Amino acid sequence: MAGLMADFGHYTHAIVRGVPASLAKDALRIVQADIDVVKAQREHEAYVEVLKTRLGLEVVELPADESLPDCVFVEDAAVVCGDTALITRPGAESRRRETELMKKTLKDLNLKIVEMTDETATLDGGDVLFTGREFFVGLSKRTNQRGAEILADVFKDYAVSTVPVVQGLHLKSFCSMGGPGLIVIGSSEPAQKALKIMQQMSDHRYDKLTVPDDFGANCIYMNLPNKGHVLLHPTAEQFPESAKVFEKLKDYMLIPVCNMEKVKVDGALTCCSVLFNKKADI
Ligand code: GLY
């Protein structure tokens, strides 16, 4: 386990997918909002550029599919841990076909593929928080108990606990990992309650970093050779008060990433990539 933790946040690869024009009208959303799709596409291009150029990851860019308006949110289609990729069964029927290209891509990258074929199970990757020690799985409108059980069965080396998600789309709509053993969490009552449940379920004492905005808590932590601790976090323009909290983090390469359009369809920073460490022997 110590060896695994030392690797936490060490990614070599990212899978991303383009933003289809159909996102504006047809992407799912909790609150009705008008989307400027060109702005969403530019925002996404900048995100991909950070992964590729600034951080040096090998980025596999999949084409947008107009018949899959939510396809940019690749995180929901697969959970990758070690050399295994669990291809999910997304909770929204309109999103199920997103897994086809994800499966092919991960297979071509030589990951071990396990598919969630049980028709009673649903799981979105946005509901899966991997801490490096264990998994927390949000039980939400998109993810059910059976989905969490299958995940536990696939990643047997880790404990898996479930957490009710009573507000927002996914578990990671209000939390994420900010470093080894550090959970970034929103301030709302449901977010704080979820954190308490995670703390009760675990035999590890996680540190917490509380930010004023729930959505502001969705960050991407990496630990990269020659770069050290890296945190992609929402910009001050989007969440001024939450950004102030991140700015106080010491010894981090802090990278504010604009996500003002995709957030209108409930897309956070983690939603837009599948990150993994493809060791040479995979
Ligand atoms: N728009 C992202 C989702 O609802 O799944």
Image (spheres, helix red, strand yellow):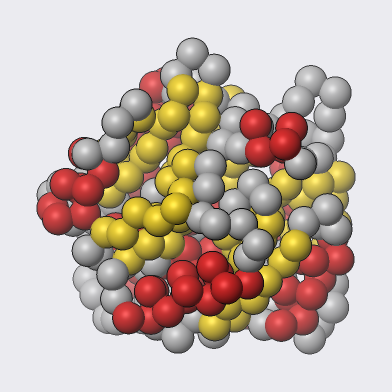
Point out the image quarter for the C terminus.
top right
| Viewer-nearest residue: 63 or 10 | 10
Q: In this rendering, would 171 be left or right of 46?
A: right
User: Where is 209 relative to 146, above or below?
Assistant: above
Task: State which quadrant residue 134 falls in.
Answer: bottom right
Q: Horizontal and vertical percent for residue 127?
A: 56, 68
- Residue at image position (43%, 46%) is 178
Q: Horizontal and vertical percent for residue 153?
A: 86, 66
Q: In this rendering, would 113 be left or right of 52?
A: right
| Viewer-nearest residue: 29 or 188 | 188
User: Where is 74 relative to 279, above or below?
Assistant: below
User: Where is 98 relative to 103, above or below?
Assistant: below
Q: Horizontal and vertical percent for residue 43?
A: 30, 44
Q: How many marks?
A: 0
- Residue at image position (80%, 40%) is 83
Point out the image quarter for the N terminus.
top right
- Residue at image position (72%, 66%) is 160
Q: In this rendering, would 57 be left or right of 132?
A: left
- Residue at image position (47%, 42%) is 179
Is residue 272 in view from this perspective?
A: no
Task: State which quadrant residue 118 falls in.
Answer: bottom right
Q: Horizontal and vertical percent for residue 11?
A: 60, 32
User: Where is 200 relative to 38, above or below?
Assistant: below
| Viewer-nearest residue: 163 or 201 | 201
| Viewer-nearest residue: 116 or 157 | 157
Is residue 106 in view from this perspective?
A: yes
